[in-house]
Image (spheres, rainbow, N blue to C red):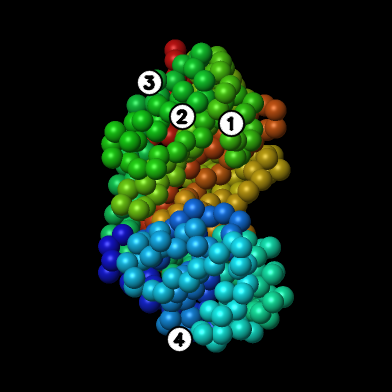
């Protein structure tokens, strides 16, 4: 991310913080910290974090173990306060909070702040902590033109990798071998931080499957869920393919999911009410009798993180606005049998026009014949 873009988001966060009525915001090491400052250290059990006050003051508080690293990372632009294991964290934090008038204050936290630490700070310093997640999501829910172009390029890399992997998949390979092939293809195309989930046969019945040891067999369906990063922007795409043959039941389920994905995608337009988008896809699956086998929201926002706002589900009372980007990914999952998912990333450009970023074929593909 360019420095001017980072400064824009930093200023936007400060404005939202002032409007919130809170005195400061605390970011523990995380994607959000790297997004806002360009650096995030390793997170461990020792308390540390970046503080931004509503007055516009910023400082970093960490264990002595990290002090030199943070000085180098932030180039002396903000004060770094550290504490030694043998002295304890709260003594030094008390002095720092007194300096910045944060004792007894109200502080918003990001999702990486550990609860056991803020409970101790609340008890010792009377600080009231609040959920700052909405602030971090709001500052990046509307993508810039540069960010939309990054999302498009990342999606194109995922599309091209799909073209390659369908000729590679065959019975006898492990899920891990297929996943590694996908990651290698994306890396060769310039993708960074490439990742892939490959769920075959009965494992495809788990929406967030996380293993890779099963050997692919004839008659399997395989869910491929994968993506990469381009210029800070993520891709996230899912396709389901079949090995050597398509069993009639799963061919029918594939058609239902395909129709649901089209319905959700077609419901996207400037001003669309998000619950209606979820319903458009979900109702197709429910009418086919599989409503109980679609156990999650229709989609999630995407950008500097794979999952961010806006979340596409029936309880999100937002309307779509220009610059938003998100997945549309219905699925049907039968425990112990298998599953099907089809996922595209959809955006609204700065004029509010819908664009489907993933263009990889969604026809039924039989691999390894």
Which image quarter: residue 277? Answer: bottom right
Please state which of the two labelled residues, at mark 1 or mark 3, is closer to the viewer: 1
Q: Is residue 295 above or below residue 180?
A: below
Left or right: residue 165 compared with residue 135:
left
Cα separation, mark 1 vs mark 2, equals 11 Å
Q: In this view, does 220 lie above or below 288?
A: above
Mark earlier in primary sequence (1, 4): 4
- Which residue carries the number 1 mark? 211
Q: Is residue 180 above or below residue 308?
A: above
Cα separation, mark 1 vs mark 4, equals 47 Å
- The quadrant in which the N terminus is found is bottom left
Which residue is nearer to you in this view: 295 or 24?
A: 24
Please state which of the two labelled residues, at mark 3 or mark 2, is closer to the viewer: 2
Please say if the residues under marks 4 and 2 sit with CB atoms less than 8 Å apart: no
Mark earlier in primary sequence (1, 2): 2
Q: In this view, does 69 lie above or below 256?
A: below
Please state which of the two labelled residues, at mark 3 or mark 4, is closer to the viewer: 4
Residue shown at 54% from the left, 58% from the top: 311
User: Mark on residue 167?
Assistant: 3
- Which residue carries the number 4 mark? 55
Please state which of the two labelled residues, at mark 4 or mark 2, is closer to the viewer: 4
Residue shown at 64% from the left, 43% from the top: 294
Please say if the residues under marks 1 and 4 sit with CB atoms less than 8 Å apart: no
Residue 145: horizontal and vertical position, in percent?
Answer: 29, 62
Please state which of the two labelled residues, at mark 1 or mark 4, is closer to the viewer: 4
- Which residue carries the number 2 mark? 179
Left or right: residue 228 compared with residue 153:
right
Residue 106: horizontal and vertical position, in percent?
Answer: 60, 81
Query: Can you see residue 43?
Result: yes
């Amino acid at each position: 991310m360019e420095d001017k873009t980072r400064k824009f988001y930093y200023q936007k966060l400060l404005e939202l913080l002032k409007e919130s009525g809170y005195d400061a915001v605390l970011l523990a090491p995380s994607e959000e910290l790297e997004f806002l400052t360009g650096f995030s250290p390793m997170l461990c059990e020792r308390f540390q974090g970046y503080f931004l006050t509503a007055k516009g003051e910023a400082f970093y508080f960490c264990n002595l173990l990290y002090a030199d690293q943070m000085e180098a990372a932030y180039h002396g632009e903000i004060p770094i306060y550290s504490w030694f294991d043998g002295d304890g964290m709260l003594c030094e934090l008390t002095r720092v909070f007194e300096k910045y008038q944060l004792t007894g204050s109200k502080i918003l936290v990001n999702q990486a702040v550990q609860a056991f630490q803020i409970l101790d700070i609340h008890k010792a310093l009377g600080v009231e902590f609040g959920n700052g997640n909405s602030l971090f999501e709001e500052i990046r829910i509307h993508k810039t033109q540069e960010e939309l172009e990054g999302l498009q390029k990342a999606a194109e890399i995922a599309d091209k990798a799909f073209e390659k992997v369908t000729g590679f998949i065959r019975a006898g390979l492990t899920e891990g071998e297929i996943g590694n092939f996908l990651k290698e293809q994306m890396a060769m195309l310039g993708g960074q931080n490439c990742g892939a989930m490959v769920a075959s046969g009965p494992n495809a019945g788990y929406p967030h499957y996380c293993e890779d040891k099963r050997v692919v067999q004839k008659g399997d369906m395989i869910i491929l869920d994968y993506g990469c990063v381009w210029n800070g922007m993520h891709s996230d795409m899912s396709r389901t393919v079949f090995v050597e043959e398509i069993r009639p039941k799963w061919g029918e389920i594939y058609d239902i999911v395909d129709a649901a994905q089209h319905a959700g995608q077609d419901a996207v337009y400037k001003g669309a009410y998000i619950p209606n988008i979820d319903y458009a896809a979900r109702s197709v699956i429910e009418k086919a009798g599989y409503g109980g086998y679609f156990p999650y929201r229709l989609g999630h926002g995407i950008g500097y993180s794979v999952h961010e706002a806006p979340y596409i589900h029936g309880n999100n009372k937002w309307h779509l606005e220009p610059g938003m980007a998100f997945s549309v990914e219905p699925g049907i999952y039968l425990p112990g049998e298998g599953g099907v998912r089809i996922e595209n990333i959809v955006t609204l450009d700065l004029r509010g026009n819908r664009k489907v970023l993933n263009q990889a074929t969604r026809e039924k593909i039989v691999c390894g014949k």
